[in-house]
Amino acid sequence: MNRRCVVIGLSGGVDSSVAALLLKQQGYDVVGLFMKNWEDDDTDDYCSSRQDLLDAASAADVIGIPLEAVNFSVEYKERVFSQFLAEYKAGRTPNPDVLCNAEIKFRAFLDHAIGLGADRIATGHYAQVREAGDGFQLLKGEDGTKDQSYFLYRLDQAQLSRALFPIGHLYKRDVRRIARDHGLPNASKKDSTGICFIGERPFREFLNRYVPHEPGEMRTPEGILMGEHIGLMYYTIGQRQGLGIGGTRGHSGEPWFVAGKDVARNVLIVVQGREHPGLFHQALDAVDLAWIGGRAPRCNWVYAAKTRYRQTDAPCAIASLDGTRCRIEFAQPQWAVTPGQSVVVYESKVCLGGGVIAQT
């Protein structure tokens, strides 16, 4: 096994390309791997995978590394997409990027890389790994506006021990500068957003192909009927757009927001005003726990947590904990805590792990 050989996931974007370039400069034998994770309805109208592969190949050529394309679409459907659909059917709002990292980028991809004879894998994530004692820690990326540790909290010690994040210590502006200085063709390429397999297609149209929708009532917490929804799965907590109940007679002109879902009665709970108490929660329960160090944090200890990506760290404590469930209490009420999303716990810059929000 070649301990200087690293297989890096090349997406066609500037981050992974610069990561590959830095590894090459550090003396590693670098092999690029382009992952295709979706095939259904994979057309140029919605999915950019063909162009991304061309961009990855162009970057690999400039860097001077080989590139292999591999298809993980079967694994993606079995390990990620099936759970994605199950969560929507249950009325929750899942985060497939978290599961994709744990099951595809750091499992199927890692297994493939080891099969190629590599000892390590690398990605263009804005995160860092640090060896500490007899284990490894996941740290936030240096660029706080781009930190992606939130999406990596399910990685275990075996995965982290083989992971490299070459740009984790850099700011985005520096990554683009390095790309320009070395003539990488994607130096100015726009960052990808959203879920890769959905692309730019209308989300409701896409989801309706896989999950039957059932219209129902929109009501306030007091039970006042405000209108009809087109299916609970199409709405998420804190959503403002697309409710169709603005300017309702007898109510103030403040916007309406989704505050909850009564799945048993198929009722969407809506409130008026962003500061409505129904949008704030002091605590939450999380399940499907994953702790990076292999053991859970201490209860009643001050930590910080995010309940969504890009959220500011919120001081909190773990009030109760068993092997499958924990309760997290925040110093200040949190806005639009969403079942199905992940709560990720930090101690300063160290990501400790987290779980899936079950209820508030």
Image (cartoon, helix red, strand yellow):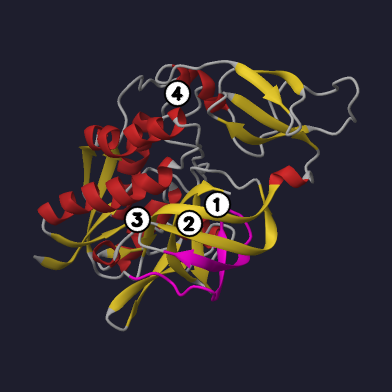
Disc 3 target residue: 123
CA gap between label 2 and label 4 equals 26 Å
Taking the spot 26% from the left edge, 68% from the top edge, the residue there is 161
Residues marked 1 and 4 touching at CB (< 8 Å): no
CA gap between label 1 and label 2 equals 6 Å
Nearest the viewer among 147 and 77 is 77
Q: What residue type is labelled 2?
A: Tyr
Q: What residue type is labelled 1?
A: Tyr
Disc 2 target residue: 150
Magenta span includes 302: yes
Question: Is tag 4's residue or tag 3's residue first in the polypeptide sequence?
Answer: 4
Disc 4 target residue: 46
| The residue stretch that appears in magenta | 295-321
x then y, percent, for residue 144: 57, 63
Question: Is tag 1's residue or tag 4's residue first in the polypeptide sequence?
Answer: 4
Nearest the viewer among 209 and 229 is 229
**Viewed as shown, does residue 282 lie left or right of 234?**
right
Say what secondary structure mark 1 lies in: loop
Disc 1 target residue: 309
Say what secondary structure mark 2 lies in: helix
